[in-house]
Amino acid sequence: MIKLSPSILAADFAELGRSCEAVMAAGADMLHVDVMDGAFVPNISLGVPVLAALAKRVPAFYDVHLMIRRPLQYIKPFCAAGANLLTFHIEAESPVEQTIQAIHDEGCRAALCIKPATPPEAVFPYLDALEMVLVMSVEPGFGGQKFMPAAVEKIAAIRAEAQRRGLSTDIEVDGGIDAATAPLCAAAGANVLVAGSAVFGAKDPAAAMSAIRAACV
Ligand code: DX5
Ligand code: ZN
């Protein structure tokens, strides 16, 4: 079963609550919250106070993607603000095992993310401890970029390794996902699809989500 996680980065921030309520009502499985610090990636998006305000107003499963240099320092505040799943980058500067542990200590699910240049094997040492792996299909930092097909093989390699170990790890893909690229990722073993522009940028987000789901069956 495919889960859709619309990225709020593509939403109109002046209407954030209303647009998130609308996509949840239209059948989104979770909300993807992109946190950028202007250091790990060359862009600044939003942080703890925005997540806290949104989570208070819109009941949802919050899938929080930390694109920040020192994730370990911010685990507690993001979990307290309402994150249900916290994803951090293997390329960031925090110790991976300790960061996974800190996320679990807060009662959150933990995911590790790899950028396009990082090989899938990089996550293997941590696979047993993770609820999810996030494979970036664009360079992190901006919405609306073109899907990089090399992500497909990486998804397949991680799915194969998880299956070999008998793990039902979620595999999420993020960047350039729409009705054309989603099926390639789903066929390779991704079961959580992030879509920003394709959902929040669509005139009819409900129809856009249905189209992505229909393309994946
Ligand atoms: C990119 C973000 C993505 C982005 C996806 O750094 O992590 O979540 O919002 O946007 P689209 O779906 O427009 O590529
Ligand atoms: Zn993201």
Image (spheres, rainbow, N blue to C red):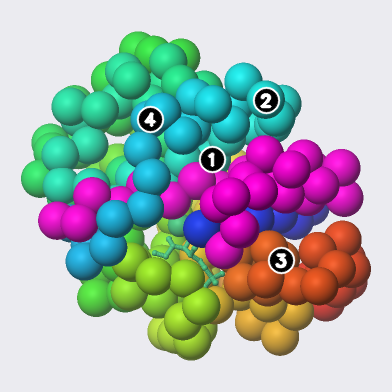
Q: Earlier in the sequence, mark 3 or mark 1?
A: 1
Residue of label 1: 63
State the SS at label 3.
helix
Mark 1 Cα within 10 Å, few/some/many (few <14, many 20+)? Answer: many
- On screen, residue 134 above or below 177: above
Picture disc at residue 199: 3
Kind of residue indicated by mark 4: Val
Label 2 within 8 A of ligand 1 by Cβ: no
Picture disc at residue 57: 2
Q: Earlier in the sequence, mark 1 or mark 2?
A: 2
**Cα–Cα gap, marks 4 and 1:** 13 Å
Q: Residue at x 61, y 58 (%)?
A: 11
Kind of residue indicated by mark 2: Arg
**Cα–Cα gap, marks 3 and 2:** 20 Å
Kind of residue indicated by mark 1: Asp
Q: The C terminus is located in which quarter? A: bottom right
Q: Earlier in the sequence, mark 4 or mark 3?
A: 4
Residue 2: x and y in percent read 75, 56
Q: Residue at x 54, y 40 (%)?
A: 63
Does the CB distance between marks 4 and 2 fall below 8 Å?
Answer: no
